[in-house]
Image (spheres, coloured by chain):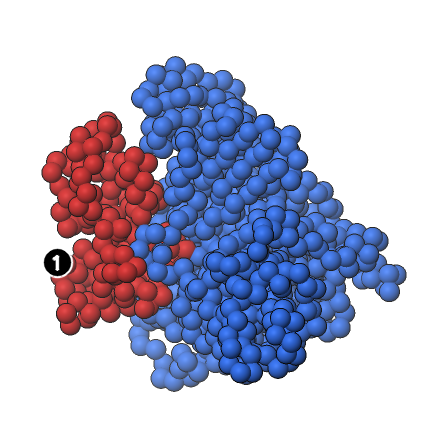
Amino acid sequence: MEITVNNTSYTIDAEPEMPLLWVLRDELGITGPKYGCGIAQCGACTVHVNGYAVRSCQLAIGDLGNSQVTTIEGLGTTQSLHSVQQAWIENQVAQCGYCQSGQIMQAASLLSTNPDPTDDQIDAAMSGNLCRCGTYPRIRAAVKAAAKKLQEV
Amino acid sequence: MMGRLRTLTRRTFLIGSAAVAGGVVFGTYLAKRPVKNPLLTDLQQGEAAITPYVKIDSSGVTLITPRADKGQGAYSLQAQLIAEELDIDPASANLSPGLPGPAYYNGTVMEESVPFPAYNQGAMAETVRRFMHVPAKLLAMQITGGSSTVPDSFVKLRMAGAIARETLKEAAAQQSGIARDQLSTENGFVVLPDGTRLPYTELATPAAGIEPVTDVELRSKSDWKSLGKPMQRIDMPAKCTGTEQYGIDLQIEGMVHAAVRANPGLGAAVESYDATAAESMRGVQKVLPIENGVAVVADNTWRAWRAVDAIDIQWAAGPYPASTDEIFAKIEKVINNEAHRDHRQRDEGDVESALEDGDIFEAQYKVPYLAHAPMEPMNAIVKVTDDQCEIWTGTQIPLFVRDHAAALTGLDKENVFVYVQPIGGSFGHKLEDTHVLQAVEIAMALKGTAVKLVWSREEDMTHDYLRPGAVAIGRGKVADSKVDTFDLSVAQSALLPDWFGRLMKINIPGPDATITTGSWDQPFDIPNYRVTGYRAPTMVPISSWRSVGASGNGFFHDSLLDELIHKAGADPLAERIRLCLDDTSRKVLEKAGEISDWNGPSISENRGRGVAFCLSFGVPTAVVTEVTNTDSGIKIDKVYVVVDVGDVLDPVNLEAQVFGGVIFGMAHAMNCETTFENHAAQQNNYHAFEGMRLYQVPEFEVVALSNAGKIRGIGEPGVPPAAPSLGNAIFAATGRRIRELPFNKQIDFV
């Protein structure tokens, strides 16, 4: 089976029902997406599939087809940060940081479809991503800062 | 002196009594003996390890940050403390937790158990606190917890930086023939009077050959360059780019993946199992019994989990009552039962006489058992050979992990190596090491192969060592619109004897402070004031959960106080201020009133606000919460928090820890509990243990005052006043007093 992750193509030998998350983490060594719950309750595993935020713990690789998968590693790097990542660093959002890959991927997906979200729209888009440290006030601030940044570009 | 201390410690709490006694008996000599610098053991050519915290070679400076980072920013802050005196940019240094060692003992964490409230900083209280560092050193307690990283490191790490700096200068002085006091340092260089810059990296070898300069003075606060100002956390870029490597992300050459299923009846054995189906599943390499469970080794985590699900296991019943109702019945049985009284640390005035007759208020409160449920589930990588055992894991107790693995493998402690990893949340969960020992067991059966064990979320939440459930009975009386009598009884299982027994194999008799921590030690002066702890039997395994005893006691004490204030017809904030006997705490309450405009125009209809206060880990913390009673439930609008930690080292991270702590406290108060049926925890994933979601998060305003004389840590103090502040606000908005957590059993949230 062929899958494309961060613009790189990989050949995978795995059961079609294996969740994308475990293909990424254990088969490909791409560990930015995190395991938190395995039942789409926490969003730590969020990646983009064809640009949209998806819980990779719920997506069987057999259902991927020709889709393009982007993980946090493909969103931006320390040398070339995505605006959302930049806003996250400027707002010093992360504490333990474990959920933040998923939070950032969710926020990037929101802003790509809705560049100027209202507070309610931010709440609606981001409420599936759980943070146990309670970084939420800064997540809210960073999403707004990133929206502003993206509009200025 | 010895005699006096012995009298004094007779009534101290468990760690106090045994360990202080131990310290006095043989500790003076041992405790004064310097602890060996562990970095000297395997120093390579050209490397210098001037203190246990600073290692320099030709490639750069490595700062050792022995307190674990579980999200509280400990790595960054430890590096900043060293760097402030060493004169380097900490972002340019390598940070390493180092190998665990006795040199990294934590003395401050033990101070919490002294029988003096934090606001008492008199000579005797301070003497006893100082003595708590002795057992910590003797027992090699390298522990991260108790909001102690900042107070324990504040002097120690700056000292390490200063000693390293002066030693490097001394090496430069010997090399250049210019006296040390003529030299200065700047960003990794010793600077000679003529402007010549000698890099630290080149001075490492000569510095290693001279006696460290230990006669150093710390810079005064006004000379700080980074400390005290907003800082950027060093781990932030990695955490925002998916490149921070947690224990769960680590890959070791040739590693296999393991899953376990342990008895959900915690501590009970496996009666029998049938793994026929699992053994033939794809990728499965081995199925083996472990203590109280069964393990699968496979080539992938998901395959290992699927296989472990396919094993049919017969369990022995857990060694405690089967259901939550039966467990709480045991707790309720001991409360106000003098045969089960554990301690009474506060007894002022005459509560008995005051409550003999008249209009007596009485109410019962309850808090549930709670899982820690950090986002990163428990995991460990272990490799065992005939000669050594290597462990890669995120842990708050690296030396205990080492010792336990040594006992299990039969290896010498010196041949067990624990490589501490960054932690994706803990809240106290990683003060336990059952998962590590399971991984050691599996690795012993696969000698020479690294085994990575990852608990599924379900395994994690049903095999936790929980925050103990507790029950309280509050009684009181008011007179002349004032609170006159306050009598609180709290019952729960004893936490510290369990933990010390489990992890250190130490059996210490005596009272357990945690039963009333956060209620007996509050800075109030009430004419008749009594707090009593009752000890319930040991039932389900329990452990420290962010803010420990104060997590429940903060709710009990402040809820009762609020009820009595309302009964007296007094203003909730004004009466707390009037009753407060500690200046630092009073100013915190006053500031909370000021920023929340407490005395301004009254809050509109259908809204309410509540104030709560708790002094925990030495930090007075006041929380004012504003809520709206909407048609579909309570909406938390805004939260004001005031703390006093003494000197603030990083205001940006402090604010994050404060609102994070308050959210943690409120989230669990809203909708979390761990209940038992058939001896098993019922909440096995986040759908049943939800916490707070972004749409429920209020606005925050956080203020840190610096009136306190001592510097404090802020990881935990935000938690205890959060729940009562929300409960008091709900009462103000709805007239309903909810005395049992979680609140959502009785009211909805939007």
Residue at x 52% of width, y 39% of height? B391
List x then y, in percent, for residue B490. 60, 55
Relative horizontal placement of residue A1, taking residue B666 as reference (left or right): left
Relative horizontal placement of residue B72, taking residue B619 as reference (left or right): left
**Is residue B12 among what the camera can see?**
no
* Residue lying at the far top of the rendered structure: B276
Residue at x 61% of width, y 43% of height? B400
Q: Nearer the viewer, residue B86 or B150?
A: B86
List x then y, in percent, for residue B574. 51, 80
List x then y, in percent, for residue B135. 72, 54
Which residue is the site of mark 1? A113
Q: What's the residue type where badge 1 is placed? A: Thr
Seen in the picture, residue B84 relative to B532 is either above or below; the reply is below
Residue B738 position by quadrant: bottom left
Q: Which chain is red?
A: A
Q: Which tint is chain B?
A: blue
Residue A108 position by quadrant: bottom left
Relative horizontal placement of residue B230, taking residue B532 as reference (left or right): left
Residue at x 20% of width, y 69% of height? A149
Secondary structure under tag 1 reads helix
Q: Nearer the viewer, residue B497 or A67?
A: A67
